[in-house]
Amino acid sequence: MNRIFGVIALSFMVTVQSMAADDAAAPAVAPDPMPTLAPILKKITPAVVKIEIRGRIAAGTNTRKRETREIHEVGSGVVYDAGQGLIITNHHVIDHADEITVTLTDGRVLSAKRIGSDPDFDLAMIKVQAKNLTPIAFADSSQVEVGDIVLAIGYPMNMGQSVTSGIVGGLHRTNIGIEQHENFIQTDAAVYPGNSGGALVNIKGDLVGINTAFIGSTNTNPGVGFAIPANMSRIIANQILEFGDIRRGSLGITIEDPTPAVIRDMKLTGPQPGAVITKVNPGSAGERAGLKSGDVVTELGRVTVRNASFLRTRMALLRIGETAELAILREGKQMTIRAIMAERQPQTSSR
């Protein structure tokens, strides 16, 4: 019996040794790489900068005393042109600034000067003197879709650069009550105080919007974030750079959504897409071009007009002297009218 147990034990030891040898000879299997956006973020986060401003604002409602108090606020910005040291941000970030300081991710602290700003769209441009800045690629924001994964990059609550993630939850958000002209990208990527002027990027690292505001936040919920689309930001930025101000044109028309009341008052045949012209000012650019009360604007520059607010925002991007190509519906017939934007009181801030 002992001899039998000895043979079994010997056989077991040989088997174990053989298995160990096989394991040693087999190549090690590398673990699957963890999904991460770190490589993309390492490339683009240097393009998002911290902006600090110091200035003075009115201390109270008594304007006779002209009392002021000093402010020190923090926001974010995005490198727009690395060669020229241009940085785009929100107008409200630098609105009351007497002194603007930019801090880069490599630790450099730079003095910045204001180039110009547009309070109606809440965009501004500043400039620093620096080499080796990191630019960011602009995406075509007209191609953004609900459900796209996005990242919000900025300097929230003065605690250093931070990144939050989410998706695009809505497009062409208007009537939010944040800005004069609105066409926001809505996102659930958290946008906190200090993120204003920072970058909203897609998973390729391309800029799709400039983070601007959030609403509905609580202690347990960051709320809903809004970003100005990159295409719109580029148009405003280029106008500031080329002309030094925003010479916003006007057609001298009043437009409204085609609500049942408007449809009844304008004696339209039924619900219409677009925006209804309810008034054309005498002698205005709109009248000279042939626009009439009751016309329904369905397209501007071959872009579908979603509603009256959308049309107002699109027209506000046109400068004096530029041509607005309008597709209209008049008494059931499609027409195209070209109107040249005329001068109006400019709405700009520049120092």
Image (cartoon, rainbow, N blue to C red):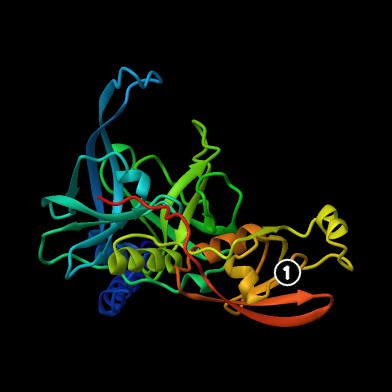
Where does label 1 land, which residue?
Answer: 292
Give the residue drawn at x 35%, y 73%.
15
Residue for point 17% across, 64% down: 133
Q: Residue furthest front?
A: 283
Using residue 312 as the reference point, say whether residue 242 is left or right of it. Answer: left
Residue situated in front as seen by the camera: 152 or 264 = 264
Please name the residue shown 24% across and 48% down the image: 50
Q: Position of residue 153 (x, y in %)?
A: 35, 54
Q: Height in image: 211 above or below 270?
A: above
Which residue shows up at 45% across the image and 62% down it? 248
Q: Pick the residue in front: 315 or 92.
A: 315
Decide which of 280, 117 is in the foreground and name it.
280
Secondary structure under tag 1 reads: loop
In screen coordinates, is 264 left or right of 24? right
Looking at the rendered image, the quarter that the N terminus falls into is: bottom left
Dot 1, how many residues are within 10 Å of its Cα: few (below 14), some (14-19), or many (20+)?
A: some
